Amino acid sequence: MNFDDQLQRYFGTRDVDALPAAALATGIERMRVDFGLEVDPARRFALWSLLYLLGQAPDLDAFENPADREAARNFMDMNGRCAARHG
């Protein structure tokens, strides 16, 4: 999944910062529905990751596989370290 393509698919733009609040909420809701329906683990993780970056990710228990939960924890940790260095 290409990040820019996902932004275009769910929000109709690649510039999320320019979205009105209602459009952002609608796109996030569509992503959450697709996350719940997606069966491919890699695609689910990609959707979860984008939702996490937008502050809207489901809890880690949304991943049935312990390895997927661990990957999500690692993503959260890496994101936190990056934010601490650059923010």
Image (cartoon, helix red, strand yellow):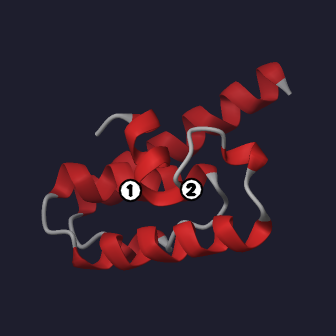
In this orientation, does residue 73 appear? no
Q: Nearer the viewer, residue 23 or 39?
A: 23
Q: Which residue is mark 2?
A: 52
Residue 34, compared with residue 70, is above or below; it is below
Q: Residue furthest front?
A: 12
Coordinates of residue 41 in the picture (x, y in percent): 18, 57
Q: Nearer the viewer, residue 79 or 53?
A: 53
Q: Which mark is residue 86?
A: none
Residue drawn at x 33%, y 70% as measured from the top left: 35
Q: Quadrant of the N terminus?
A: top left
Residue drawn at x 32%, y 53% as measured from the top left: 45
Coordinates of residue 58 in the picture (x, y in percent): 50, 73
Q: Is residue 40 left or right of residue 74?
A: left
| Whole-number angstrom distance, CA of label 2 to CA of label 1 | 9 Å
Q: Is residue 68 left or right of residue 26?
A: left
Badge 2 amino acid? Tyr
Q: Nearer the viewer, residue 2 or 65?
A: 2
Q: Callout 1: helix, strand or loop?
A: helix
Q: Quadrant of the C terminus?
A: top right
In this orientation, does residue 58 appear? yes
Q: Which residue is mark 1?
A: 47
Coordinates of residue 15 in the picture (x, y in percent): 65, 39
Q: Callout 2: helix, strand or loop?
A: helix
Q: Is residue 44 left or right of residue 51?
A: left
Coordinates of residue 44 in the picture (x, y in percent): 28, 59
Proximity of marks 2 and 1: CB atoms separated by less than 8 Å? no
Q: Is residue 7 left or right of residue 82?
A: left
Tell me which label, 2 or 1, sits earlier in the chain.
1
Residue 66, compared with residue 87, is above or below; it is below
Residue 12, compared with residue 64, is above or below; it is above
Q: Which numbered mark, 2 or 1, is in the foreground of this view?
A: 1
